Amino acid sequence: MTTILEKPGYNPDKKYKIIGTSPVKHDGFDKVTGRAKFAADAFLPGMLVGKYLRSPHAHAIIKRIDISKAEKVPGVKAVVTRDDFPEIKAGTGGGDMTRIAMAREKVYWEGHPVAAVAATTESAAKKALKLIEVEYEVLPHVIDPVQAMRDDAPILHDYLRTKGVKGPAAEKKTNVVERLELSKGDAAKGFEKADLIVEGSYDTKPMHQGYIEPQSCIASVSDDGQVDLWCCTQAPWVYRDRLTEILKLDSSKIRIQQSELGGGFGGKTTFYTEPVAIVLAQKAKAPVKMTLTRVEVLRGTGPVSGTASKIKMGCKKDGTIVAVDAELIFQTGPYTGSAFTNAPQAMLTRYEIENVKTVSYEVVSNRPKVSSFRAPCVPQVVFGVEGLVSEMAKKLGMDQIDFRMKNAIVEGHKTIYGETFTKIGFVETLQAAKTCDHYRSPVPAGQGRGIACGFWFNRGGETTGSMALAPDGTLNIILGTADVAGSRMSMSMMAAEEFGIPVDRIRSQLADTNSLGYNRVTAGSRTTFSSGMIVVDSARKIIAELCRRAAKMWNVPEEGVVFEDGHCRPASSNVGDFPPLSMKDIASKTTYTMGAICGHSEMNVTGAGPGFAVHIVDVDVDKETGLVGVKRYTIVEDAGKAISPLQVEGQFQGAAVQGIGWALNEEYVFGEDGKLQNAGFLDYRMPVASDVPMIDTVIVEVANPKHPYGLRGVGEVPLTPAMAAIANAVGEAIGIRPTSLPMSPPKLLKLIEQAKAQGLN
Amino acid sequence: MSRKHHVTATVNGDEYEFLCETQQTLLDVLRDELMLTGTKEGCATGDCGACSVMVDGTLVCSCLILAVETEGKTIDTIEGMASNDELHPLQRKFLELNGLQCGICTPGILVAARALLERNPDPTETEVRYWLAGNLCRCTGYDKVIRSVLAAAEEMRGA
């Protein structure tokens, strides 16, 4: 039987009734009234409070932990340390995960958990934490990834050897996890053909995902070992499988229910409190709630990779890019997992370039383990690439968009990582950018304008879901993906479109891990696409069943029944003169037919259409203070088909402002002692409303033929070019294009001085 | 154990009595004792505004006030914003214009925006931006938040 993957049924001529409108999100009502339950909003009878003791050192051997005094504090029900977690070999996936949850041999960053307490009150827990004695042997630490690669750098793991190197280097103790070369053609020869060669060295700092909801969970354990876990997560099934691995539990003995998710952006694809709360609950024999403070979120959970890169690009006089050479270094925290391989795959994918050489390194260092963030590791390198692209265009005297158009890829492009693209919309996106009001308007006096483009693969993967028709003809959808910003509503809308009924007759809800089969992490801009496939497939199964039931009720052949606008009708007058049967008519009589009508779908979804964006930014720079003001910002991006345009715009706008934060303010500042100096929202300053302008959006719709409605993911793409575009704008404003993020006032003042000295402004 | 304080306060129009420890903030008591979890904790240092409430008509971060200080005071939280089954115009506009995504910052923003419109029914975009500069939102980029507030203000002026 052909599946929806082979035959999605995309019809360019179809007129939609619900797709493309922006009805009020059903989950929104609870969010404006305070009724929505986020992770920290739940309580269980007899619940204890769990709190962490964290390492004060960036790198140290744990020589001894004594919890005896802490255990005696009134109200304390359990104290756990490394001794309470199963031993798993260091340097393995499970070994790394358990050591991130609770330090074993060493602490690897300031804030690494070393013990945890569960007590009847927070004050009792805090009192106990002060009485835990930990003896450390402090070791030298290293945080900067370039320093961590040096021969004299402190080594984090004695067992680590670099993957991807040969000879004596492969035997050396090192902090380099992997060296990865991804190349095509012959870069050296390519540069020989170049009329213009540009190059630069770039660095970016770790920044945090910045979700406003700190991680929180409640674990409870029954007397026979059944674990119930409530938490905010982008990946309930991934949590389940990793928790069972590191805690040696059966999957059938753990049930995870996701709460409303108060922001994630990739940062809630990895667990922190969950294994510790479970072990505390097992030991205390009572439910345990663990909620991180903001300081703990910043100190203990994953900021993104800091990077250092050297990039060289060459083009011909006509603007054809002929060669690229890049060395990219990614900081990953103490353990591998930065997803750095995305970077060489995505950094240039939008341009047709014959000769490319990239060498990438992932490097461990003494900072919190990296966690995903929108298009992991890509925006950092696009920051460099699009600076050079703009420089080439400028030096050749070409229009910024024309230069990119000259090199733009189209359908049939074979990527550096082996995929051949079907229909893509990069050219259309560039065209839309060129004709948008912002690009056509002159740059205001005293300001600089920057342009940059970005790409993200968009993802599919294992996804499940189900749908049940109630006797009154309404529908409930159960989804395995998390809802990070409104995807439940998009699912209800797609189902409503399939059935031809009002969207208010459909509700989507988030499953627990016992309700459905495995779902991959909700990340990579895969959700609306993948769960959308599941929803449409399930709806079509229900429609087929409705037609079967109608055929039985009418006593006609199944092919004599058609379904439209929520009703089964005779396919023609030859079938008979039957009044249409509504979904309610059929669903209310299932007792007399063959029982309940449900649809479900399990797929390893493929066919996610890649996405491309163009960002246009105008800035001014205060020449006395170095402060950047973002004056105008437009995102032009291919969404394939915007299911709910207001939600798609929201994705673009949110990403732009995260990019503004990353570009101008946000960074982890470490002291000489390896301690984080700005672990709070006052000093780790994310953009506030008065820092930013309205963000204009242009939604381009070049349908993805692999989806029934043509949609493409839109979550990651809009962050990829943001910092590059802002840096290009700053460069135009001050005369020198910055190469270091964040573009904080002190750095820009130096560049402004330099530009003055060189007569550039 | 430390002795607890007995506090009587009016919350969303109803009189409440509660016991609290000296160091417990109003936010702690609202969430953990009164189970009014619509008020959120984002930072506990007064930097994110997710815990915004009104105390005797003044907009405050409930994480920066001790619960014991609210004896005899009137507290208004997000749970009291809709009245008689009718959403407040701000709540409605946030829904209609997609002024929220994940929703964790939304209660604080709504409470703060209502306080703005009570003192300035016709704010400019810049005034809204500066008034809400104490409310962090990581999802929306603020665009639709600001538009929702301006649209609600316009509707309320017309009403």
Image (cartoon, rainbow, N blue to C red):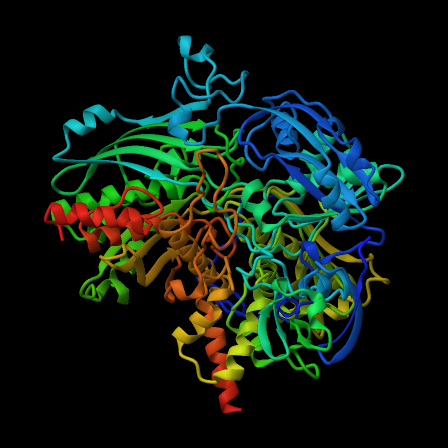
Q: Is residue A670 visible?
A: yes
State the image coordinates of residue A57 (x, y, percent, origin top left). Answer: 56, 32
A314 relative position to A408: left or right: left
Residue ranking furthest to the top? A168
Q: Nearer the viewer, residue A420 or A365?
A: A365
Is the residue A104 above or below the residue A670 in the image?
A: above
State the image coordinates of residue A24 (x, y, percent, origin top left). Answer: 57, 70
Q: Is residue A553 visible?
A: no
Look at 83% across and 60% down and name the residue there: A593
Is the residue A172 above or below the residue A289 in the image?
A: above
State the image coordinates of residue A387 (x, y, percent, origin top left). Answer: 26, 44
A672 relative position to B72: left or right: left
Q: Nearer the viewer, residue A355 or A99?
A: A99
State the image coordinates of residue A206 (x, y, percent, origin top left). Answer: 44, 41
Look at 81% across and 59% down and name the residue there: B3
Q: Nearer the viewer, residue A52 or B39?
A: A52
Q: Nearer the viewer, residue A205 or A710?
A: A205
Residue ranking furthest to the bottom? B159
A598 relative position to A395: left or right: right
